Image (tube, rainbow, N blue to C red):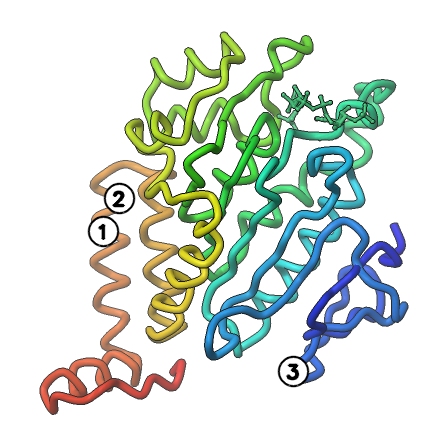
Amino acid sequence: MALNNIRFIFNVTKITSFGALHQTGKRFASAAAGSYQNILADKAGEKKNVGLITLNRPKALNALCDALILELADAVQSMDKDETLGAIVITGSEKAFAAGADIKEMLNQTYSANIRSGLLERWSDIGKCKKPIIAAVNGYALGGGCELAMMCDIIYAGDKAKFGQPEIIIGTIPGAGGTQRIARSCGKSKAMEMCLSGDQITAQDAEKMGLVSKVFPADQLVAEAVKLGERISRHSPLIVQLCKESVNVAFETTLQEGLRFERKTFYATFATEDRKEGMAAFTEKRKPNFKNN
Ligand SMILES: CCCCCCC[C@H](O)CC(=O)SCCNC(=O)CCNC(=O)[C@H](O)C(C)(C)COP(=O)([O-])OP(=O)([O-])OC[C@H]1O[C@@H](n2cnc3c(N)ncnc32)[C@H](O)[C@@H]1OP(=O)([O-])[O-]
């Protein structure tokens, strides 16, 4: 897939070919001098240290077509490599974060084509990002949209957001993590209820069940997500990465293994200069000057 679909409103990275992203300094740019067609990518926050990706297919309520997923995976990968960024926010419009995978595109898809395409690997690439990703969800987050939000590390929602896994209504099941991630973060009963009924839930219910961290008025949502990204970006990027990895282990292993991983990672922070700087700064009553080292 050529990357002539890509539009960066504030260019920061040069893309020479699909999957080959090179940082060129302060701006993202695609080699095709084209730009993303289905997303916008920008730097946000006072210090421009938060990557902001906006899903931008308004006519299809940000339905996640193949091209959009490829662009999103590239933008995330590019921002992950950009040392000026400490966190990434993914958002959509006030009407829709994303209304799911593109049903029209999937309509005539076959089993064998699914196996061959490896497209779902590109979806999971988004979850491999080492930097924290905050989903700022306004409007519909359905099917793959809800799954995309759950691939992120933190979900903030606008007060009118709606979450759901309606795949069952169209004769399929969630395919990008819905059955697994809801079960792990909210328990079996909620996962079964959402996936088997296809019902939508409100932002307030999603917060109550732990799917969402906080709910904000819709028009303040992205600013609040960026502020959180800025707070995270103040910390040592190295230690933030270790911390994210450690929390993620909780979803993949037993408590004992998780505790062992955490303890070893905690010890490992003592091999970093940033750990020493953080504690020295506290003792000397000054702000730390982290070097990502
Ligand atoms: C190998 C692939 C791997 C994929 C893995 C992903 C797995 C995933 O778990 C599967 C899914 O997500 S399954 C999906 C699960 N998601 C669902 O089942 C949700 C499906 N969507 C809906 O139920 C309704 O659109 C809403 C209730 C969201 C809004 O209702 P409303 O306010 O009356 O608005 P409206 O008038 O209805 O829509 C406006 C325009 O957007 C269009 N469009 C919207 N969603 C689309 C989509 N997903 N697709 C395409 N297009 C979609 C809609 O057609 C219309 O365009 P048109 O040119 O005018 O025809």
Label 3 – label 1 distance at C-alpha: 40 Å
Horizontal placement of 46 versus 24: left or right? left
Q: Is residue 49 above or below residue 122?
A: below
- Decide: few, some or many residues near mark 3? Use Cα within 10 Å; few <14, some 14-19, many ≥20: some
Q: Pick whichever, 159 or 70, lies toward us.
A: 159
- Where disc 3 sits, the SS reads loop
Label 3 – label 2 distance at C-alpha: 41 Å
- Is label 2 within 8 A of ligand 1 (CB to nearest ligand atom)? no
Mark 2 is on which residue type?
Glu
Tell me whether circle 3 and circle 2 mark residues in contact (CB < 8 Å): no
- Is label 1 within 8 A of ligand 1 (CB to nearest ligand atom)? no
Residue 182, position in %: x, y?
42, 27
User: Which residue is label 3 attached to?
Assistant: 26
Residue 265, position in %: x, y?
28, 62
Q: Residue at x 46, y 70 (%)?
A: 86
Mark 3 is on which residue type?
Lys
User: Which residue is label 1 attached to?
Assistant: 260
Tell me whether circle 2 and circle 1 mark residues in contact (CB < 8 Å): yes
Q: Residue 12: which quarter of the image?
A: bottom right
First in residue order: circle 3 vs circle 1: 3
Residue 207, position in %: x, y?
33, 33
Q: Residue 227: which quarter of the image?
A: bottom left
Q: Is residue 206 above or below residue 53?
A: above
Residue 247, position in %: x, y?
32, 50
Q: Residue at x 53, y 69 (%)?
A: 44
First in residue order: circle 3 vs circle 2: 3
- Where disc 2 sits, the SS reads helix
Name the residue furthest left.
283
- Is label 3 within 8 A of ligand 1 (CB to nearest ligand atom)? no
